[in-house]
Image (spheres, rainbow, N blue to C red):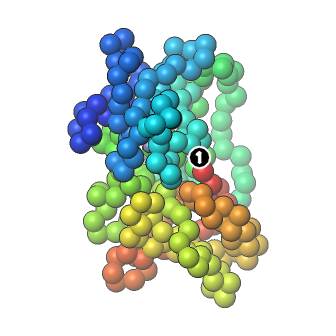
Amino acid sequence: MANYAYRDKERRYIILANEALEEDRNKSFYCPNPRCNSKLFICAVDGCRKTYFRATKSAYKHIANCPYANSAVIFDDNEYNRATFSFENAIQNLLVENNSKPVMSDSKSTSCGEYINHTLRTIRQIYSMCKQFPPNYSYGNEKIGKMILDDRTAYWYPKGVFGFKIIESCVNGRFYDNDKNEIYLVAPIANPNYHFILSIPDINLYRKIRNMVFENKDKFIIVAGQWNSSKADGRTIKSIIHSNKQITII
Ligand SMILES: [Zn+2]
């Protein structure tokens, strides 16, 4: 499911689900994933005014491995306060080892997500937000394309992926080294020409993450890191993993 789509196959004209007009109801649109050939239609969430794009026709489903086929990428913009979101602070919080409770106020929730005003906090929330806005859009203090490496944004990173970023990655072949406490992933999914090394000094955390990746080798591995070049080629990039909050499976 997607909060946005494109009117044209070249993906020049974006349409946001919440800005769709009545006349768009029966039209088909193109998936945010540039490699996906599905046809998307506007649908409403039951009981809410909220709308989103879905591949409702069986002949035009999302391709295998399209993130927008996954309901885990759903993001309700009304639930979170954009103004208080700082990407760098959010990622830094994920890199903190201990489980000190973040300061958050409890808010009442409605099934439609109205009147809620949290700030994005978990990697899952931040990832879903990144997937549901076009790369050129800004959220909080940063552009989407600067927050996430995926198939949509790969062209933003011709020289490598450095600093605080989220990567949408997967397993390709041998994915761990027990002597080095390292996990190996590749990204972006459709054209995985970057190699990522997760260096995990804590042996218990290493084993936990290795087992989690092992059990989900066919899924997307989403990682928040502070990335540095590991080899001169700029294609091998490493981050220390301090906390399992840095990783989620989609
Ligand atoms: Zn798709």
Question: In front: 22, or 116?
Answer: 22
Question: In front: 202, or 43?
Answer: 43
Q: Residue at x 38, y 55 (%)?
A: 151
Question: In front: 242, or 182?
Answer: 182
> Farthest right residue?
204
Q: Residue 16 placed where, x, y %? A: 37, 27
Q: Residue 33 placed where, x, y %? A: 39, 46
Amino acid type at circle 1 is: Arg
Q: Which residue is mark 1?
A: 124
Q: Residue at x 66, y 44 (%)?
A: 102
Left or right of 63 on screen, residue 145 = left
Left or right of 207 on screen, residue 134 = left
Look at the picture and state if 146 lies above or below 103: below
Q: How many marks?
A: 1
Q: Residue 60 placed where, x, y %? A: 44, 37
> Farthest bottom residue?
179
> Farthest front residue?
59
Left or right of 177 on screen, residue 130 = left
Look at the picture and state if 111 lies above or below 95: above
Q: Residue at x 27, y 39 (%)?
A: 9
Q: Secondary structure at mark 1?
A: helix
View quadrant of ligand 1: top left
Question: In front: 229, or 185?
Answer: 185
Q: Is residue 163 visible?
A: no
Q: Is residue 46 visible?
A: yes
Disc 1 crowd rating (10 Å Cα; few below 14, some 14-19, many 20+) is many
State the image quarter where residue 150 is shown. bottom left
Look at the picture and state if 168 lies above or below 10: below
State the image quarter where residue 111 is shown. top right
Classify mark 1 as within 8 Å of ligand 1 or not, answering yes or no.
no
